[in-house]
Image: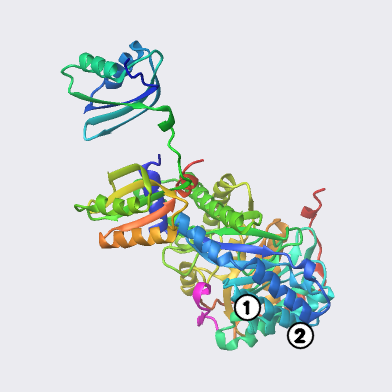
């Protein structure tokens, strides 16, 4: 008996153009799959989209993959699917506080690796990351990390480690609670 | 997700525009400590302050660190000492002042306010005692501030108190003659003084306030100036109504930061949050000046014709933005023009573009008044009293706060420089036109009655 998924995560990658989401969602509708969540981004003309779908009738991952391959044959799109088990649908989250890390300084190899190594060491998860943020000064490279800092860690040590790493990388770093950005800019 | 613009604009405000929280002030009630026994009172007072404010500085620094917004000053205000210590003789008032100062030093706050008396309608025993103690109290302390409410719209102007305080200012200046009369920089005389001011020297914990409260004073002249600079660069034909809109939006942002920090500090200290004071408060740093805003608005200096109109626009726009940003607005809430504390304003005085008369005119449309104004040392008590009376009259008639923080600098004359140090800055001594011509009027004494404006019921 095929392994029927409760929910499926579908990721789509490829050269960006009009109609990708329309065609993917159209196929999902024809297969009686409800889209429960979706997110997409475009970088350098490349599209990446993720959909969480719930089949309304039994559907095996393999069937979905096959239909996608048939429908998008020759379209230069890559698909990835994964089933979401009930128990893993909502991982037990530790209490965290939302912070924003920014670095400003000269671009260099190992910049992201250097900063994120510290984040990883303290169990700090990144939930949004932007590089190549445009500013007036072209020599300055700005990166913005939106992160969740676990409340259980020693924030003073985390801050020190982060600032020390930024100094070694010749970056001006700031670590601020996210609320301040919303308070200042949003009504 | 935050937008890049939101993140970058916030960083810019912090790094290059002096965005900070100027003061977090913990108000502490002392009324339940009242006793005729001076020694016992002082013990209780120190225990109360050092107990309640034990972690104030640490919490402010921690919260400032989390949000990346520094809290520049941490302060305490207490119930008006003339009321709490009503039974005390002047000697005991001096001792109480020193205990306040010691407590402030122990918890490492920058200033403690509340060596204060409310005398708009008359001078009670405690008031007289406290006023007599002021010169020694301010001379022998470093963090203590004194404030006096001598006039309200409801009561009029107590001219006896005005003259008595003018004499007290002279005595306080003489007591600190070696420091250019520094004691006077910590002594404010007010009309319509609010009960919840977080700024010094006017801060005291009012009789209508709870046991403890956190009030916040925001900053922001640097942020306003940069916002206007950017707008003028982008549009050479910027009109004044567009200027008002920019200031309003900027004041909104600055106020939101103040309230965010204040509420978090209050939560951590487990005391209620009081108010955000919307005043634009300068410091003696380049780029953090109210005076510089006038130059962005096309005036060569603060003080030249057009300055009163410009300040009216600025002050109004700050209030509109701030009032929208917070439902808990209080204190002075207006722009400050403290001469020695603002490099640009001090320079306008030094070059003669800003005169005492123009300062008085400006105070009719802004927050505080003749603030940190250095006067010739030989200015008589009667002339000081007359200057204060004029300032009080503006407040009483216009239903607003006005104040005088005047420093008659001993041994110095108009054009000399006076140095007060730190945030208090330095200033050129301003000439007093018509000095010595007011004695007959102020010596008549009594009270200028409450104006018709008081009959609002």
Q: Residue B147: image x %, image y %?
A: 69, 71
Of residue B397 and residue B92, the one placed in the foreground of this image is B92
Local secondary structure at mark 2: helix
Which residue is depicted at the point 55% across and 62% down?
B59
- Return the disc, 1 or 2, that comes first in the chain's sequence: 2
| Residue at x-position 66% and y-position 54% | B272
Query: Above or below — where is B102 with respect to A92?
Result: below
Question: SS for tag 1?
Answer: helix
Label count reads 2
- Residue beneath label 2, please? B91
State the residue lying farthest toward the top.
A30
Residue at the spot of label 1: B184
Position of residue B445 relative to residue B192, above or below, is below
Here the colouring is rainbow
Q: Which residues are magenta?
A: B411-425
Question: In the rendered structure, the residue with mark 2 lies on which chain?
Answer: B
Given residues B452 and B62, the one toward you in this image is B62
**For the point 31% across and 53% down, which residue is it?**
A103
What predominant SS class does the magenta segment belong to?
loop
* Depicted A97 relative to depicted B78: above or below: above
The residue nearer to you, when weighing A132 against B336, is A132
Relative image position of residue A168 (x, y in whole percent): 26, 62
Asked if residue A150 is among those painted magenta in the image, a careful observer would answer: no
**Residue A74: which quarter of the image?**
top left
Q: Please name which of the two marks, 1 or 2, marks the residue nearer to the observer.
A: 2
- For the residues beneath circles 1 and 2, the answer to whether they share a chain is yes
User: What x and y, as percent, mark residue B144?
Assistant: 64, 75
Residue B147 numbered tag: none
Where the N terminus of chain A falls, by quadrant?
top left
Question: Is B423 covered by the magenta stretch?
Answer: yes
């Amino acid at each position: 008996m095929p392994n029927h998924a409760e929910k499926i995560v579908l990721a789509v990658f490829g050269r960006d153009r009009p109609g990708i989401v329309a065609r993917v969602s159209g196929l999902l509708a024809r297969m009686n799959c409800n889209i429960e969540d979706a997110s997409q981004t475009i970088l350098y003309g490349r599209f990446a989209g993720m959909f969480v779908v719930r089949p309304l009738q039994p559907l095996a991952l393999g069937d979905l993959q096959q239909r996608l391959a048939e429908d998008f044959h020759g379209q230069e799109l890559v698909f990835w699917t994964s089933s979401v088990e009930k128990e893993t649908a909502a991982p037990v989250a530790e209490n965290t506080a939302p912070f924003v890390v920014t670095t400003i300084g000269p671009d260099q190899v190992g910049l992201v690796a250097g900063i994120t190594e510290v984040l990883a060491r303290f169990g700090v998860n990144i939930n949004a990351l932007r590089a190549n943020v445009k500013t007036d000064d072209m020599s300055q490279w700005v990166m913005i990390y939106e992160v969740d800092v676990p409340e259980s860690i020693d924030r003073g040590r985390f801050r020190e480690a982060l600032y020390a790493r930024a100094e070694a990388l010749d970056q001006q770093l700031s670590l601020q609670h996210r609320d301040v950005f919303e308070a200042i800019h949003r009504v | 997700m935050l937008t890049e613009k939101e993140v970058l604009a916030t960083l810019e405000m912090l790094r290059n525009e002096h965005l900070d929280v100027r003061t977090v002030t913990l108000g502490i009630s002392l009324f339940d400590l009242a006793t005729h026994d001076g020694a016992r009172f002082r013990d209780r007072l120190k225990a109360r302050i050092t107990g309640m404010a034990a972690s104030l500085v640490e919490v402010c620094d921690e919260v400032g660190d989390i949000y990346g917004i520094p809290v520049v000053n941490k302060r305490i205000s207490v119930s008006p000492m003339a009321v709490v210590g009503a039974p005390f003789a002047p000697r005991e008032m001096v001792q109480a002042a020193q205990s306040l100062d010691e407590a402030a030093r122990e918890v490492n706050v920058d200033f403690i306010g509340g060596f204060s008396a409310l005398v708009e309608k008359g001078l009670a025993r405690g008031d007289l005692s406290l006023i007599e103690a002021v010169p020694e109290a301010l001379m022998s302390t470093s963090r203590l501030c004194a404030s006096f409410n001598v006039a309200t719209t409801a009561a009029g102007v107590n001219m006896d108190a005005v003259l008595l305080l003018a004499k007290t200012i002279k005595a306080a200046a003489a007591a600190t003659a070696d420091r250019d009369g520094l004691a006077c920089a910590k002594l404010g005389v007010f009309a319509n003084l609010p009960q919840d001011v977080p700024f010094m020297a006017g801060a005291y914990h009012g009789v209508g306030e709870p046991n403890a409260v956190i009030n916040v004073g925001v900053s922001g002249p640097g942020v306003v100036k940069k916002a206007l600079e950017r707008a003028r660069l982008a549009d050479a034909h910027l009109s004044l109504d567009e200027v008002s809109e920019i200031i309003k939006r900027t004041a909104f942002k600055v106020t939101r930061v103040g309230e965010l920090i204040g509420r978090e500090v209050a939560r951590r200290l487990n005391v209620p949050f009081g108010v955000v004071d919307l005043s634009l408060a300068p410091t003696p740093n380049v780029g953090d000046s109210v005076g510089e805003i006038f130059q962005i608005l096309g005036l060569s200096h603060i003080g030249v014709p057009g300055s009163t109109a410009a300040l009216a626009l600025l002050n109004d726009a700050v209030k509109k933005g701030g009032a929208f940003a917070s439902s808990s607005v209080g204190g002075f809430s207006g722009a400050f023009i403290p001469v020695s504390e603002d490099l640009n304003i001090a320079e306008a005085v030094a070059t003669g573009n800003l005169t005492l008369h123009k300062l008085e005119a400006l105070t009719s449309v802004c927050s505080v008044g003749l603030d940190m104004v250095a006067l010739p040392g030989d200015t008589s008590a009667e002339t000081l009293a007359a200057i204060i009376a004029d300032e009080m009259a503006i407040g009483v008639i216009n239903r607003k706060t006005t104040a005088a923080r005047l420093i008659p600098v001993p041994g110095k004359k108009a054009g000399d420089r006076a140095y007060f140090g730190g945030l208090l800055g330095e200033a050129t001594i301003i000439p007093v036109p018509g000095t010595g011509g007011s004695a007959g009027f102020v010596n008549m004494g009594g009270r200028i009655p409450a104006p018709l404006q008081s009959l609002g019921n």
